[in-house]
């Protein structure tokens, strides 16, 4: 799809609201893990801005690691295939781990990641997400720390992308399609999903 077929729409969550909520969650994590070290695992690429906000408010010894996974491919619906492109750099055995996501939608990626990471025997495993979209859920999974409930719309900004665009917006907005006047162009094309991770797979699992 041409990059000119979609554009930034209405503002949904402001930068001030996101930063305030991240501060609240950082404070809650500090309270919940008092006296413990915490390892945050950011899921690339969308979680980076949210992770940076949350970690600044965690008043504990905190380490960071990152994973890169793919699940959506080129369409707006999950393909059911979860691919690990970048694995952890650190051993998580015996550590208190929090997975940090930009959005929990179908839950299929997180379900796989939780099973995968649990196999490494962490002391505990929880999920922190900037956005939760229960309407898109296809498996039973819930986040422990939630920034905001997402409306049933395609979202961009603050790490969320459309074909790698719009990640740098300092707020969250809806995306709109632009009508194409070229040769009676079809305006009902699919918009790429906000999970814009790469598709080079080192590990692949088909989830039925």
Image (cartoon, rainbow, N blue to C red):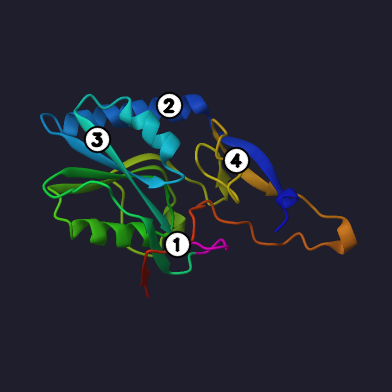
Q: Secondary structure at mark 1?
A: loop
Estimate the x, y position of residue 178 in percent, counting from the top left. Answer: 76, 49
Please tell me how crowded label 2 is: few (under 14), some (14-19), or many (20+) other residues with Cα within 10 Å. some
Instruction: Identify the main secondary structure in magenta.
Output: loop
In the picture, the disc for residue 19 is: 2
Residue neighbourhood size for the residue with mark 1, other residues' Cα within 10 Å, grouped as few (<14), some (14–19), many (≥20): many
Q: Earlier in the sequence, mark 4 or mark 3?
A: 3
The Cα–Cα distance between marks 1 and 3, rounded to whole angstroms, is 26 Å
> 194 above or below 54?
below
Q: Is residue 50 magenta?
A: no
Please name the residue that numbered disc 3 is placed on. 63
Give whichever of discs 1 and 3 has the lower sequence position: 3
Please give left or right for residue 63 compared with residue 206 in the image.
Answer: left
| Mark sitting earlier along the chain (2/1) | 2
Instruction: Quickly name the residue at label 4.
Output: 166
Region of the chain picked out in magenta, as a range? 71-77
């Amino acid at each position: 799809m041409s990059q000119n077929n979609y554009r930034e729409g209405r503002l949904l969550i402001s930068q001030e609201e996101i930063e305030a909520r991240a501060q609240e969650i950082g404070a809650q994590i500090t309270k919940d893990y008092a006296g413990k070290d915490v390892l945050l695992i950011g899921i690339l690429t969308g979680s980076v801005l949210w992770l940076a906000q949350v970690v600044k408010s965690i008043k504990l010894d905190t380490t960071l690691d990152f994973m890169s996974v793919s699940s959506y491919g080129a369409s707006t619906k999950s393909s059911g295939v979860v691919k690990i492109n970048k694995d952890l750099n650190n051993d998580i055995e015996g550590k208190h781990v929090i997975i940090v996501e930009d959005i929990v939608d179908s839950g299929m990626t997180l379900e796989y990641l939780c099973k995968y990471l649990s196999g490494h025997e962490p002391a505990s495993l929880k999920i922190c997400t900037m956005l939760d979209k229960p309407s898109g859920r296809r498996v039973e999974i819930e986040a422990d720390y939630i920034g905001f409930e997402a409306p049933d719309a395609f979202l961009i900004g603050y790490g969320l992308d459309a074909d790698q665009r719009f990640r740098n917006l300092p707020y969250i907005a809806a995306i709109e399609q632009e009508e194409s006047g070229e040769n009676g162009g079809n305006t009902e094309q699919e918009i790429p999903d906000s999970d814009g991770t790469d598709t080079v797979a080192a590990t692949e699992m088909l989830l039925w």
